[in-house]
Image (tube, grey):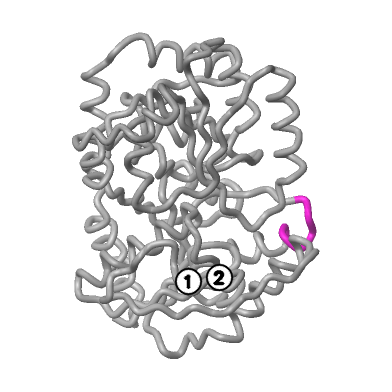
Amino acid sequence: MRIALLTYSTRPRGGVVHTLNLAEALAAAGQDVTVWALARGGDAGFFRAVAPSVRQALVPFPDIPQEGVGERILRSISALREAFDPRAYDVVHAQDCISANAVEDCVRTVHHIDHFTTPELAACHERAIVRPHTHVCVSSAVARELADGWGITATVIPNGVEAERFAAAARDGDGRWRARFGPYVLTVGGIEPRKGSMDLLEAYALLDDPDLRLVVAGGETLFDYRGYRTEWERRAAALGIEPIVLGGVAHPELPALVASAAVFAFPSLKEGFGLAAMEALAAGVPLVTRDLPVFREVFGGVALFASGPRGLADAMRAALAVPDPARREAGRALAFRHTWQAAAARHVALYESLRP
């Protein structure tokens, strides 16, 4: 089949990571796959090398100074719509709100449900849910949200994980990050409301351990969270703590950063699956997540669950103080069960079921 996978960016974010790995697994299974993406700010390619078996179609999308979020979203949709010709493909699969608005008649993966107050974003989000003819969710929890809110039945196909890549980093024992920071709590996903960044900051302060650092990696996003980050920085100063904010981490460096963490904190308020947390499990790192239905579904039995700063602090303290090799091995095994090959096979079966 000629398959087009569409995503909104070339930069490292969960949906983009998902798109590239799925594309490569589909191509390895013999499908003809093209990934379409907006090349933001002059990007010449994706954040990592892509297998040559996957075609790439990058749509130039220059930055406009002082452009508002709503305007940027609408311009993103327009740029992708004008460049993309759906007639060239047997399957058109949009991976996010922007690409689903650009192509409309498509398969849509709903990674998680957002709740926007900006009118343009709220309308974009609604159209991206109701217009696609077929829906995929990466967890049953999100599928239930679609069913309860819109009466839509989605096919559940969990994420794959590059488990061996992160397990190998743990086996290699590369100590550069630990030598640089000492023991650290790691979170990946940046500083933003959905990631529960403020609660993690408060929880870290409650640990009251001067030898333990808080490291925040990632954070590429379309949205403007400068106000939230300013408040986060002010609160850190008031608490007398100095988190290490790395921003984006080069693709080859990320596994060692994850594998060297003393504990991986994932206090998100809303997620569809938790790919970064599953990568931490592959590396054998203790995992603490917020107590949400989606995390109970995906990580039940291998994570420590908590809510609120005090609960998160207590769970991190327990993870740091009490080795639990059985839980770690169960976490590794779980990560290795989520393969991109299996995800691709289930996508192919879905695509085949849609053919006339």
Residue 104, position in %: x, y? 57, 75
Q: Find out whether the residues at labels 2 and 1 contact each other: C-beta distance under 8 Å.
A: yes
Instruction: Give the vertical position of 255 relative to 88 (above or below).
Output: above
Which quadrant holds residue 239?
Answer: top right
How crowded pointer 2 is (Cα within 10 Å; few <14, some 14-19, many 20+) is rated as many
> With 85 as the anchor, is 332 left or right in this view?
left
Residue drawn at x 74%, y 20% is 238
Q: Identify the mark nearer the N-term, 2 or 1.
A: 1
Question: Which numbered tag is attached to residue 273?
Answer: none
Q: Amino acid at mark 2?
A: Ser
> With 89 as the anchor, is 32 left or right in this view?
left
Q: Where is mark 2, residue-wise?
A: 99
Residue 101, position in %: x, y? 61, 71
> In front here: 60 or 37?
60
Which corner quadrant holds the N terminus? bottom left
Residue drawn at x 55%, y 67% is 8
Q: Which residues are magenta?
A: 117-122
Residue drawn at x 64%, y 66% is 127
